[in-house]
Image (cartoon, rainbow, N blue to C red):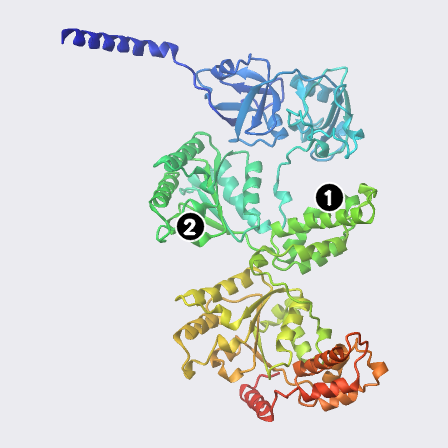
Amino acid sequence: MAPKSGSSSSKKKSFAGSSTADPKIVKFKLPTEFITRPHPSREHGRETCTAYVHPNVLSALEITPGSFCTVCKVGENGILVTAKAGDEGTHPVNVITLSNSIRSVGNIILGDRLEIKKAQVQPPYATKVAIGSLQGCDILKCIEEKVIQKLFDDCGIIMPGMIFHNVKTQTDDESIDIIIVDASDDSLPDVHQIDLNSDVVYGMLEDQIYLSPPVIFRKGSTDITFTKEMQANRKYNLPEPISYTAVGGLHKEIESLKSAIDIPLHQPTLFSSFGVSPPRGILLHGPPGTGKTMLLRVVANTSNAHVLTINGPSIVSKYLGETEAALRDIFNEARKYQPSIIFIDEIDSIAPNRANDDSGEVESRVVATLLTLMDGMGAAGRLVVIAATNRPNSVDPALRRPGRFDQEVEIGIPDVEARFDILTKQFSRMSPDRHSLESEGIKLIASKTHGYVGADLTALCRESVMKTIQRGLGTDANVDKFSLKVTLKDVECAMIDIRPSAMREIFLEMPKVYWSDIGGQEELKTKMKEMIQLPLEASETFNRLGITAPKGVLLYGPPGCSKTLTAKALATESGINFLAVKGPEVFNKYVGESERAIREIFRKARSAAPSIIFFDEIDALSPDRDGGSTSAASHVLTSLLNEIDGVEELKGVVIVAATNRPDEIDSALLRPGRLDRHIYVGPPDVNARLEILKKCTKKFNIEESGIDLQELACRTEGYSGAEVVLLCQESGLSAIMEDLDVTKVELRHFEKAFKGISRGITPEMLSYYEGFALRSGSSS
């Protein structure tokens, strides 16, 4: 046994010896990605194109300090910079510091994750550089050319898209931002002379390694041309920073967001002087496509703060505790690099309500971690958390109290003015010679696009461009592509394909029925137009007089008298979002599902306002509660009453209901404030029947047959509109059965059709409707 113990002790000694030697030969672990931080020196000088990196990283990547390297966002093309070693003791291993000018090329914001690579080729010398200013001014009037030359000479490497911020003018009181619009050398083709059809457009080259082509400025041999351009040449396809001016229709929301972010981040002492802590959290909520994520990006681009983004479930891990650790790391990094902003997009996916049956143990732990971290921000200094969701009620309520998410900003569906603003900004991004839309045309589109959100309007502009291109290519394959212009007609054609987001899941392909297709019923048409169009066209007058628009209308009358047809015409002619609900389809065998269906219908109608909800056969949904209706029907009726005129006000939604059994509808639904107007849709009179006959027989060639339509109209006294249409259909069918190649319908065919039609409207039925009209007293 002795030798064994000896060997084991020798093993221990050797193991101990190796462990003591390990620190001397420890291998440096290279980070997979690096954090963007600002340059220590803010003035423009020789270090503008310098990236400071930890010396161990440079040696691991075999990059010599002072040589060229490329930095890029993960998975994208790079930007050429000069590598320099930072201080080994103070410079973090996973940090790269870049100047504002370099970050402006690739739209890199503080906190972005970067990769660094060794550059293989030295950039060529520039022969010509075109510059402009973000202010669009004449640069030579503000700054001498030798100042610009010294600026570029100190910089060394320049590239299109590089912005030199706050360059002092000759007066020294003002400053301008200089941008490099274009740069060319002997090896690069002149971008101005490249045709769009050619394959040498920069940004589409297969062997392209740089985001923007770098060149070396050589004083004396590089020509500088001055332009009034305000951005880099579009052919370089550089990422454009989004500013607040690019967001349309959200002026109030932007102002509240600015005040809630800028002051706590950049002037926190203002709050401490009052003895209160600044607001730490902001929750943006609203329907999908209204611009919540876009606002987050704008804040990131304009705040000059360290930005950390959590995209919903991207931090969720399958291993226990890793999700919470990822959250803690993000908050720790935000505390380290202040001022900082943490964005949480789709927060409902990582912090759902813990009271729900669906939320499990993992979700509860994540919510608890988030609550603890947000409570710990009290003394964190300049740190703000901004979250976005389209389901605010699904977020855990503990997060929505003051001290966590102090402010909630609703990003709602844009109104007419907001839609006009969005469309104007979308079309202003096009060159003026590529569209022929004036302000009046854009206003017309804005007035027609009810319920469209910002994403829908952007898609509408894109689709209208597609329609323009298809129109050009359809007429002539060799058409000049630069002569194509987006017209108002193209946008109107695109509106057929682009539907409001809120209406897509319930989109109905309504048959195109116009008021002219309904024979007679002039009074009915007038009343319907008044109800729907007047509140939209004269909304200011309604507000001035303090009058509320009618909530709803009940169409009642015998079967076949164009009640449903009127609703179809209303959907086509009004141009308003239209939801059709067939009475019995709401009912569900599961308890509570029918009521939820009603709530969902009204929620969609509110989000797509102004809108019309059409209930066909409403007597099936709202039977009289005194008449022994089932409990399910009573619950549906209660939901319907609450939605139409309950505690929550119904704005911008009109209810149109149709029935042929008005006395079976519960009286609570028929009172003013719910279905205000009761319109009797009676059988057509002589003139209306004559109109119907003319419409149905316009292809019958009755002039040759000598049929007197006036006489037929008199003979159909008491017929409903549907029965008059059936008369024409049957007579035409009879003519086809006699002769398959028939070209005209004769009187004998009508006589034969008369024999096969029985009247559905009886005098008792008419007296029943007259009695209801007298009782309800609101038939006008």
Does residue 336 lie above or below 120 as drawn?
Answer: below
Tell me the residue at 43%/19% (across/down): 29
Q: Tell me where residue 318 sits by quadrant.
A: top left
In this rendered view, identify the residue nearer to me: 574 or 683. Answer: 683
How many numbered circles does the render carry?
Answer: 2
User: Is residue 2 in sight in this rendering?
Assistant: yes
Ranked by sequence position, the earlier of labels 2 and 1 is 2
Q: Amino acid at mark 2?
A: Val
In this rendering, does residue 687 appear at all? Answer: no
Find residue 196 and report its horizontal and vertical position in percent: 77, 34
Secondary element at image label 2: loop
Local crowd size for mark 1, using a 10 Å CA cut-off: few (<14), some (14–19), many (≥20):
few
Secondary-structure class at tag 1? loop
Quadrant of residue 629 within the rendered picture: bottom left
Q: On the rendered structure, is 571 left or right of 52?
A: right
Q: Which residue is mark 1?
A: 430
Residue 404, numbered circle: none
Name the residue at 67% across, 71% down. Answer: 569
Above or below — where is 349 with respect to 193? below
State the quadrant of the C terminus.
bottom right
- State the image coordinates of residue 13 (x, y, percent, origin top left): 24, 8
Q: At label 1, which amino acid type do we have?
A: Met
Q: Is residue 353 left or right of residue 302?
A: left
Q: Position of residue 576 (x, y in %)?
A: 64, 64
Residue 698, position in %: x, y? 79, 76
CA–CA distance between discs 2 and 1? 40 Å
Which of the labelled discs sits on residue 395, or is there none?
Answer: 2
